[in-house]
């Protein structure tokens, strides 16, 4: 049996199991609380696993391993930012949010404010963040399938050529996520996350042990081999190959590169606690204490996983080599699957290679599928609970109506994501993820923190903060080198190419940084504060009520 | 309720821990990012074999994250939860 058919088989097994869980979960889903929050019946440990499942996207599994494999140390920067970010969620957000909200992020923001403007703003930013993140995952899935199934240009698989296979994958992934969410609701989606997180951590642990065995469990030996094979020597183990590059003789370019690194670092560490699909996970547990436990478990799983990506990335650099990785995929996204194949071959011949590749490839599919389901759930919940029930119906919708609308919303958002992804297959996946984090940090985080901790905060402040952060992030990215005007000089006499979305010759950028966070995050906070002070609205009594509920859990849903 | 000495004590106990701690870990993380950008020679110093300061600094970020998470959950279960429980019980008894 070829690796390709084994991959398909394993993937079908995963799909079959998760669909069975989904159908089972749908029978347990009767109330709105069941649909939106899984009946708040998950334990801290279960939710910790599910959070890890929601968080460890293909971007972190394939993307970070690939970055480390190609650029060495700099890939590690991502892991550190993504992990430390969880302390913001643990110390400032998780428990208070669990106690004061019900189904969505906007429940907390609108607690003491005028419902309609705040919920509208929160729904807009929730859906924007989720759609960018969804696009990243689905575009990644399409590219991955074409590569993993080995469909090169000119050849076909099941009668599909590479670009048709990409589209078919996007449609399939989209259809499955719609089924998980509409049928299984939060309960089904949570179990999908749990299964996937278990698979991902096990798969990564297996490869880590194999890599370390090759290097006699000696980290220094592994690093040395990776540095040698990379052709970059000791620089491969130091910061600076990818981020914050020093351009000799050009102080301005060097300054901008370094500011870009700091800007990325900020968005990574502050974005997590503003991601809607992560925030709604805190509602699936019965108490603030369980929410705390779930974050502590999530930190343990995610931290361990990122430590393993170090071994995977440097292992791929040492055993597969950057030449072979770049030959397969320029961005390095296939480094982990390629490493699996090499390791399998070393330990079990061609069969071993095929089996391990198939296992890791199906883990990658499961990863993507689970994350997109979480994102679809978050955005459809917000559309139904915030926009339909509280803005359109002004809080007069019945539970039944709300859940029906939520299911329809999941269908619509899923369909929109499929269509957008098909048109977006040329977009860079890492850019889409970084953009989602930047919006979450600039638009959502200020509003969340200020509504939990600032007595004076009010409707104008919340609305100004959300739209200010959201618009500034998007505008800065549109006028950044990511979209236009970045010229990549050709190496060895080859012509220069465009490093932007637009080709050479189109250049309308005026913002020098690729990551907007350094400007847009402070701007989001500033808008929220100024907006607050410009309005006279102030409700000390309602804030006291929110504070008592948030801190003690009295009256919490 | 929000003016009772118990609630003021609970709020103070929470804020006394989470605000300084947030400040500390963000500063520690930013120091790491800034050193990665501006102190490259120091980060490149080899310590044991091929293991350099940059790697150790990065791994220390993992260690401190794990420790802070552990420390906070200990602090919360001994210092915050008992206070919160007592007040919630009192509030819910009043409602009945």
Image (cartoon, grey):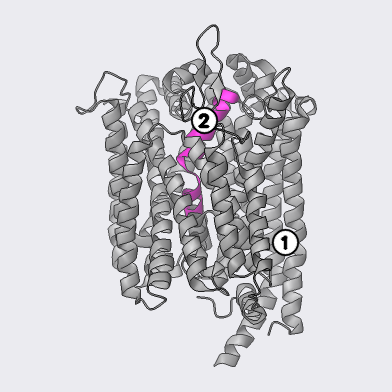
Residue A414, horizontal then vertical, whole percent: 33, 51
- Is residue A510 visible in the rendered image? The answer is yes
Give A123 or A53, whichever is nearer the viewer.
A123
Q: Residue at x 37, y 74 (%)?
A: A393
Q: Give the number of the disc on residue A494.
A: none
**The magenta stretch spans residue A352:** no
Q: Real-space Cα distance between discs 2 and 1?
A: 42 Å
Left or right, residue A520 beside residue B54: left
- When the figure is inspected, residue A428 is found, relative to residue A31, above or below; the finding is above
| Magenta segment main secondary structure | helix
Range covered by the magenta-colored residues: A50-71
Tag in front: 2 or 1: 2
**The magenta stretch spans residue A59:** yes
Residue A75, horizontal then vertical, whole percent: 59, 32
Q: Farthest residue toward the left?
A: A159
- Tell me the element at label 1: helix
Say which quarter of the image contains residue A312.
top right
Give A254 or A193, whichever is nearer the viewer.
A254
Q: Give the number of the disc on residue A484.
A: 2
Q: Residues within 10 Å of mark 1 (few under 14, many from 20)?
A: some
Give the labeled residue for mark 1.
B18
Give A29 or A127, whichever is nearer the viewer.
A127
Residue A502, horizontal then vertical, whole percent: 46, 29
Quarter of the rendering occupied by the N terminus of chain A: top left
- Is residue A209 visible in the rendered image? The answer is no
Give A363 or A88, whichever is nearer the viewer.
A88
């Amino acid at each position: 049996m070829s690796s390709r058919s084994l991959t398909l088989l394993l993937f079908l097994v995963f799909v079959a199991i998760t669909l069975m869980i989904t159908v089972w979960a749908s029978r347990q889903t009767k109330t709105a609380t069941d649909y939106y929050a899984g009946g708040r019946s998950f334990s801290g440990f279960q939710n910790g696993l599910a959070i890890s499942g929601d968080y460890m996207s293909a971007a972190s599994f394939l993307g970070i391993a690939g970055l480390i494999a190609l650029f060495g140390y700099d890939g590690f920067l991502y892991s550190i930012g993504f992990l430390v970010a969880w302390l913001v969620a643990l110390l400032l957000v998780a428990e208070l949010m669990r106690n004061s909200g019900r189904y969505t992020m906007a429940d907390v923001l609108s607690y003491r404010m005028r419902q309609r403007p705040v919920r509208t703003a929160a729904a807009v930013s929730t859906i924007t963040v989720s759609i960018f993140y969804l696009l990243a995952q689905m575009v990644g899935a399409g590219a991955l399938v074409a590569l993993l199934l080995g469909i090169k240009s000119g050849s076909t698989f099941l009668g599909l050529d590479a670009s048709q296979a990409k589209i078919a994958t996007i449609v399939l992934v989209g259809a499955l996520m719609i089924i998980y969410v509409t049928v299984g609701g939060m309960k089904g989606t949570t179990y999908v996350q749990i299964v996937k997180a278990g698979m991902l951590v096990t798969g990564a642990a297996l490869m880590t042990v194999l890599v370390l065995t090759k290097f006699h469990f000696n980290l220094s030996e592994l690093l040395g081999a990776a540095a040698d094979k990379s052709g970059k020597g000791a620089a491969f183990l130091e910061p600076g190959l990818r981020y914050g590059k020093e351009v000799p003789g050009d102080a301005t370019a060097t300054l901008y590169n370094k500011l870009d690194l700091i800007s990325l670092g900020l968005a990574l560490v502050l974005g997590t606690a503003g991601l809607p699909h992560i925030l709604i996970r805190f509602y699936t547990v019965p108490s603030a204490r369980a929410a705390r436990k779930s974050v502590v478990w999530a930190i343990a799983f995610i931290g361990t996983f990122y430590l393993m990506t170090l071994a995977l990335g440097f292992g791929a650099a040492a055993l597969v080599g950057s030449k072979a990785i770049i030959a397969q995929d320029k961005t390095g996204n296939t480094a982990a699957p390629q490493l699996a194949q090499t390791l399998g071959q070393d330990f079990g011949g061609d069969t071993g290679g095929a089996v391990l590749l198939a296992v890791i490839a199906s883990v990658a599919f499961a990863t993507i599928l689970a994350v997109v389901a979480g994102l679809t759930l978050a955005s459809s919940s917000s559309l139904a609970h915030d926009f339909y029930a509280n803005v359109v119906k002004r809080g007069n919708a019945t539970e039944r109506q709300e859940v029906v609308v939520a299911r329809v919303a999941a269908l619509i958002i899923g369909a929109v994501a499929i269509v957008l992804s098909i048109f977006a297959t040329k977009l860079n996946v890492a850019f889409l993820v970084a953009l989602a984090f930047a919006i979450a940090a600039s638009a959502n985080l200020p509003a969340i923190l200020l509504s939990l901790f600032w007595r004076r905060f009010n409707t104008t402040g919340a609305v100004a903060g959300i739209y200010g952060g959201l618009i500034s992030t998007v505008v800065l990215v549109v006028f950044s080198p990511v979209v236009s005007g970045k010229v990549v000089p050709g190496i060895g006499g080859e012509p220069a190419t465009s490093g932007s979305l637009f080709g050479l010759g189109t250049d309308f950028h005026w913002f020098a940084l690729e990551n907007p966070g350094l400007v847009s995050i402070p701007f989001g906070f500033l808008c929220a504060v100024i907006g607050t002070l410009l309005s006279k609205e102030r409700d000390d009594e309602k804030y006291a009520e929110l504070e008592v509920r948030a801190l003690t859990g009295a009256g919490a849903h | 309720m929000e003016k009772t000495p118990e609630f003021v004590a609970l709020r103070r106990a929470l804020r006394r821990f989470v605000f300084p701690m947030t400040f500390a870990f963000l500063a520690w993380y930013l120091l790491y990012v800034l050193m990665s950008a501006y102190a490259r020679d120091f980060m490149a110093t080899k310590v044991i074999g091929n293991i350099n300061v940059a790697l150790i600094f990065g791994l220390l970020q993992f260690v401190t994250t794990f420790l802070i998470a552990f420390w906070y959950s200990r602090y919360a279960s001994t210092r915050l939860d008992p206070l919160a429980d007592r007040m919630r019980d009192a509030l819910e008894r009043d409602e009945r």
